[in-house]
Amino acid sequence: MRVPNLRISVPAALALLLSLTLFLPQTSWAQYVPQSQTQQNQNQQNQNQQNQNQTQQNQNQQQETPGSAGGPGNDNGPIALPKKTAPAAPPPPPPPNIKNPPGLGNLSMRVNVPVVNVDVDVLTQKDHQFIPNLQQDNFRVFENGVAQPIIGFQQVKAPITAVLLLEFASNRYAWYLIQDMWQAAWSFAQQLQPQDYVAVETYDMHTELLTDFTQNKSVVENAIESLQMPTWDETNVFDALYTTLDRLSRVPGRKYIILVGSGIDTFSKITLDKTLQKIKETPNVTIFTISTGGFARAMGGGMGGMPNSIAYLQADNEMQTYARMTGGMWFEPRFQAEFPDVFQQINASIRNQYQLTYRPTDTKMDGTYRRIRIELVDAEGQPLRMVDQKRKPLKYMVIARDGYTAQLPVQ
């Protein structure tokens, strides 16, 4: 079959092509774009989006935290913004109100303020009789020369706590010395009161405790009667006094030492300086000393007595020092008949006293030794003058320890 030749003009061909496209399926042009070109376009879009985000972030940061005034890159327009100041810190919270646990109560802190107690005897010079009825305004207390305010005052009459310290040695003058010691110890025992506490010690080369503190007068008398045969020749009074003071430092309250002996030291390990230092460091102890052998020393060596040598004079001076440092008294009786009167004076002194209390103006706790001086004055502040029953001037003496050792920060 022969197909006839068709001749179509150009305008007709274009119209035919347009009509054919109308009947084709609707397909996206993107399906006909090459894949490589599509990936490039996508990457380009992502990069543009990241640039826009970074630009927006920089603008926000500049608006929120402007720099210091006048600095580069800190202009947010024609005027440079000043730097923002930090806000003021809030006030501290109030202290917590802490309460103690139930049942514990309120706790408080106590500061130790030292006070000094001074026992004062005011006695007549002639017969050593106690002078009563003095008032607080009659006393003046000086510490290292500085007047101290008295915060406590009373006159007391109380039982005693005492150690009877007796020299009992077998030396060449033992007969004279032991006879005086026996008489003195026995006179002391006879004047004890039922409420008194007494211990008895002896010393030669060693210190021996015959009886500890007791209120039984019979025990004290039996201890004295047991002193029959001395053993050692040595008279170590420094060791004995030091040991006794050390023991009394652990006994509360006011204590007394009645030291009866010649005062001679022959073989002590402790020196005199250490003994005096121990006396200074031991509070609330008063020492009364009685030197024995007075009659034999008065007779002299030529009549069978004891030589009145420099050694015994030095011993008397030491016995007197022990008493003076502690507010006691020293006695040197020559006859045994004097001993009862001696102990009457001692009893009057230790059973009738004025007790003064003051708070030192020098509050330093440095361990130094402070000197104490007591004076009696009248209402005008002048030295007190006394008269006896016959209106004659009455001489008196004020007896008190001459000082004390201040505390240390840690004791």
Image (cartoon, rainbow, N blue to C red):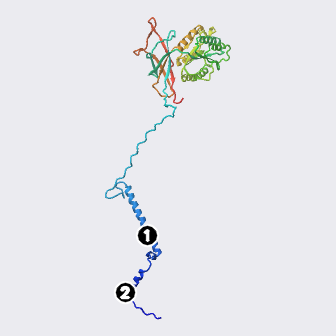
Q: Amino acid at mark 2?
A: Pro
Question: Is any part of residue 194 visible from this angle?
Answer: yes
Residue sitting at the far left: 78
Residue sitting at the far bottom: 2
Question: Is any part of residue 399 visible from this angle?
Answer: no
Q: Amino acid at mark 1?
A: Gln
Residue sitting at the far front: 1
In x, y percent, where is residue 395? 47, 10
Q: Say which quarter of the image contains residue 267.
A: top right
Q: Nearer the viewer, mark 2 or mark 1?
A: 2
From the image, which quarter does the C terminus lie in?
top right
Residue matched to label 1: 44
Residue sitting at the far top: 390
Q: Say which quarter of the image contains residue 306.
A: top right
| Rendered position, 28 above or below 104 | below
In x, y percent, where is residue 191? 58, 11
Side of 266 where 139 appears, left or right? left
On residue 11, the disc is: 2
Q: Secondary structure at mark 1?
A: helix
Q: Secondary structure at mark 2?
A: helix
Between 274 and 305, the one nearer to me in the picture:
274
Question: Residue drawn 38% across and 58% down?
Answer: 62
Callout 2 crowding tier (Cα within 10 Å): few <14, some 14–19, many ≥20: few
Between 379 and 288, the one nearer to me in the picture:
379
Callout 1 crowding tier (Cα within 10 Å): few <14, some 14–19, many ≥20: few
Give the Cα separation between the discs numbered 2 and 1: 43 Å
